[in-house]
Amino acid sequence: MKILVIDDDSAVRKFIITTLKRENHTVFEADNGTAGIQMFQDERDFDVIITDLIMPDKEGIETIMEVRKLNPSIKIMAISGGGKVGPENYLVLADALGANATLRKPFSGQELLMSLKLME
Ligand SMILES: [Mg+2]
């Protein structure tokens, strides 16, 4: 699959990308929602977008809403370790706004791949 990974944490991005590439996915990355939306509009034919929720500049909830508007059928996975109120609230919100899957950080490579499989 062609997958776009959006996360402001470079270590998390690297971990996700390494995991996905090992499974032969084609992976693009962005470090915030603005860059992610730009990449999404340039490339278009992504199968899945994996986005962090708490990011500077443009955060994940807004990113999910914009991506949904541009492509109602694309698969979106929201990932979060949460902020002050804990990850659940953010993930529930992401789910309500159209994420197809949510995953709480920290997660293993296996959990990520399983979650990806369940979205198919
Ligand atoms: Mg973040």
Image (spheres, helix red, strand yellow):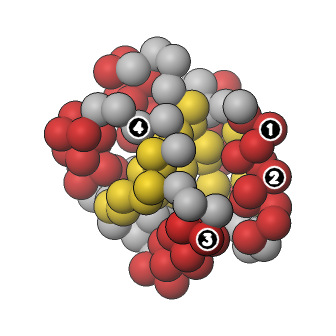
Q: Position of residue 56 (x, y in %)?
A: 34, 63
The 10 Å Cα crowd at callout 2, few under 14, some 14 to 19, many 20 or more, is few
Q: Amino acid at mark 1?
A: Leu
The 10 Å Cα crowd at callout 3, few under 14, some 14 to 19, many 20 or more, is few
- Look at the numbered disc 2 and give the secondary structure of its residue: helix
Q: Amino acid at mark 2?
A: Met
The residue that mark 1 highlights is 118
Q: Is residue 15 left or right of residue 54?
A: right
Which badge, 4 or 2, comes first in the chain's sequence?
4
Can you tell me whether the CB of the residue at mark 3 lies under 8 Å from the nearest atom of ligand 1? Answer: no
Q: Is residue 115 left or right of residue 39?
A: right
Q: Is residue 116 left or right of residue 98?
A: right
Tell me if I can see residue 44 in this picture.
Answer: yes
The residue that mark 2 highlights is 114
Of badges 1 and 3, the one in the foreground is 3
The residue that mark 3 highlights is 22
The residue that mark 4 highlights is 46
Residue nearest the viewer, comparing 49 with 106:
49
